[in-house]
């Protein structure tokens, strides 16, 4: 049976006030969330939404998900304090959010590529996912917990929006995914092991 993810998203609603919520809290990491109609709802910044949607799509590849859909393409409204009005990767008026640009960069990066697997590196919290693109190893990498410098060999690095960061032997991974090209094809074997 195919595994599908039909709706995954993060709301970028303004967290200084939560409109029409039952209860508002801050968790131990200082992240805002609220409860509405019995549901716990977390809020993120525009940049966090972008990073989380890219990471979620790569993790879906890791788990063999055959169909993945981000929710929502366009914000449902203009109220900055309404959860549902801020789930889009495009604002209600059509302006793109950072998440749109990040997903576009990911899709261009992995277009035509085959997912190979996750490679363990120096820092165990780091996620390094390898794809085979036209017989060459490429990777998407990040660290959800902290900033961590990892040795990845000589690699051309791009940020999550596809902007060139240069050629590097060591990369500091953060919550924002980076794209790695010009890496050794040995990564294909490491990912398959």
Image (spheres, grey):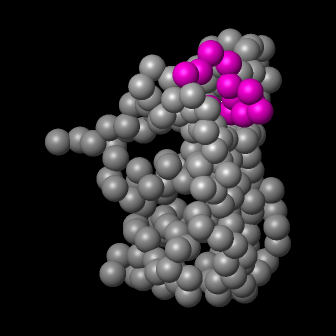
Residue 107 in view: no
Residue 67 at x, y percent in the picture: 37, 38
Residue 170 at x, y percent in the picture: 72, 84
Residue 58 lies within the magenta run: no
Considering depth in this image, is 64 or 110 the residue closer to the camera?
A: 64
Instruction: Decide if residue 64 is on the left or right side of residue 131.
Output: left
Q: Is residue 89 above or below residue 118?
A: above
Q: Main secondary structure of the magenta part?
A: loop
Q: Residue at x 82, y 67 (%)?
A: 165
Instruction: Decide if residue 87 is on the left or right side of residue 36.
Output: right
Q: Is residue 107 above or below residue 159?
A: above
Residue 122 appears in which quarter of the rendering? bottom right
Q: Residue at x 76, y 81 (%)?
A: 168
* Residue stretch rendered in magenta on the structure: 11-22
Query: Where the N terminus falls, by quadrant?
Result: top left
Query: Where the C terminus falls, by quadrant?
Result: bottom left
Q: Residue at x 71, y 78 (%)?
A: 171
Residue 146 appears in which quarter of the rendering? bottom right
Q: Residue at x 35, y 76 (%)?
A: 192
Residue 43 appears in which quarter of the rendering? top right
Instruction: Decide if residue 116 is on the left or right side of residue 154.
Output: left
Q: Is residue 125 above or below residue 6?
A: below
């Amino acid at each position: 049976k195919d595994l599908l993810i039909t709706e995954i998203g993060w709301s970028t609603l303004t967290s200084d006030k939560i409109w029409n919520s039952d209860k508002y809290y801050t968790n131990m990491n200082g992240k805002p969330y609220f409860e509405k109609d019995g549901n716990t709802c977390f809020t993120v910044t525009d940049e966090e939404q972008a990073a989380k949607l890219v990471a979620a799509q790569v993790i879906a590849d890791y788990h063999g998900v055959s169909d993945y859909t981000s929710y929502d393409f366009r914000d449902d409204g203009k109220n900055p304090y309404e959860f549902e009005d801020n789930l889009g990767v495009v604002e209600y008026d059509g302006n793109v959010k950072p998440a749109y640009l990040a997903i576009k960069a990911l899709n261009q990066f992995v277009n035509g590529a085959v997912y190979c697997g996750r490679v363990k590196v120096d820092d165990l919290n780091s996620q390094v996912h390898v794809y085979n693109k036209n017989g060459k190893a490429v990777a998407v990498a990040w660290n959800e917990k902290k900033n961590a410098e990892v040795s990845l060999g000589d690699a051309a690095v791009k940020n999550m929006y596809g902007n060139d960061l240069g050629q590097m032997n060591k990369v500091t991974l953060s919550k924002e995914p980076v794209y790695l090209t010009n890496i050794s094809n040995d990564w294909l074997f490491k990912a398959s092991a």
